[in-house]
Amino acid sequence: LDGSLHAAIAADLDTYLSPNPQLKSFLETLNADGLNLFLLTNSHFPFVNAGMQKILGTNTDDWRSLFKAIVVKARKPKWFASHTPFRRYETSTGMALWEKVTHFSPGDVYMAGNFTDFTAITGWQRSKVLYVGDHIVSDLED
């Protein structure tokens, strides 16, 4: 994909996204109840960041603290069966760091990766994860 759809949406977020004042408190409640929240997307970080800021009504990156792991450019559905390693994504430069990812730090952003390494790093069991997708093709395991 050439990114033109993301560029068009990002250029006019008001047309495509509406703020949801209750979403942040809902996610905070889930965290307070001990649930492990993560964001897994095929999108690039700048697009996700702009969208999350718009939806949560913030101009900062504080939304990232709501998730135990944030993974961008995941390449789903291949993500579920691949062996692609995780890379930490440096948000200030837009570059991937090439050291091996052995843990996820809340607020940090990671890219690529795969399901097997994700479950090994987090320790979360498949039967204990509720996955909510937004794209019927890419969000289902082959």
Image: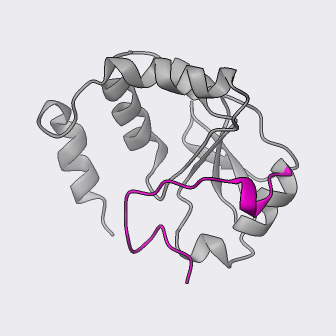
Image location of residue 138, percent across then percent down: 44, 71
| Residue 141: in magenta span | yes
Identity of the residue drawn at 68% across and 25% down: 33
Asked if one can make out residue 61 in the rendered structure from this viewpoint, the answer is: no
Total number of numbered labels?
0
When asked about the image quadrant of residue 23, the answer is: top left
Queried whether the magenta region covers residue 111, the answer comes back as: no
Residue 134 drawn at (x, y percent): 38, 57
Q: Quadrant of the N terminus?
A: bottom left
- Residue at 22% across / 56% down in the picture? 5
From this view, report whether residue 98 is shown above or below residue 9: below
In which quadrant is the C terminus drawn? bottom right
Q: Which residues are magenta?
A: 123-142
**Residue 11 visible in the displayed image:** yes
Q: Image point 28% across, 51% down: which residue?
A: 6
Principal SS element in the magenta part?
Answer: loop
At horizontal 48% and vertical 67% (from top left) the residue drawn is 139
Along the horizontal axis of the image, is 102 left or right of 43?
Answer: right
Q: Is residue 122 left or right of residue 10?
A: right
Q: What residue occupies the far bottom of the structure in this picture?
A: 142
Q: Is residue 71 above or below residue 109?
A: below
Where in the figure is residue 130, as x and y percent of width and height? Answer: 60, 53
138 relative position to 34: left or right: left
The answer to which of 18 and 110 lies nearer the viewer is 18
How far across and down, in percent of the image, does residue 95 sit?
A: 60, 46
Check the image and report above or below for 27 versus 83. above
Q: Determine the residue located farthest toward the left in the rendered image.
A: 15
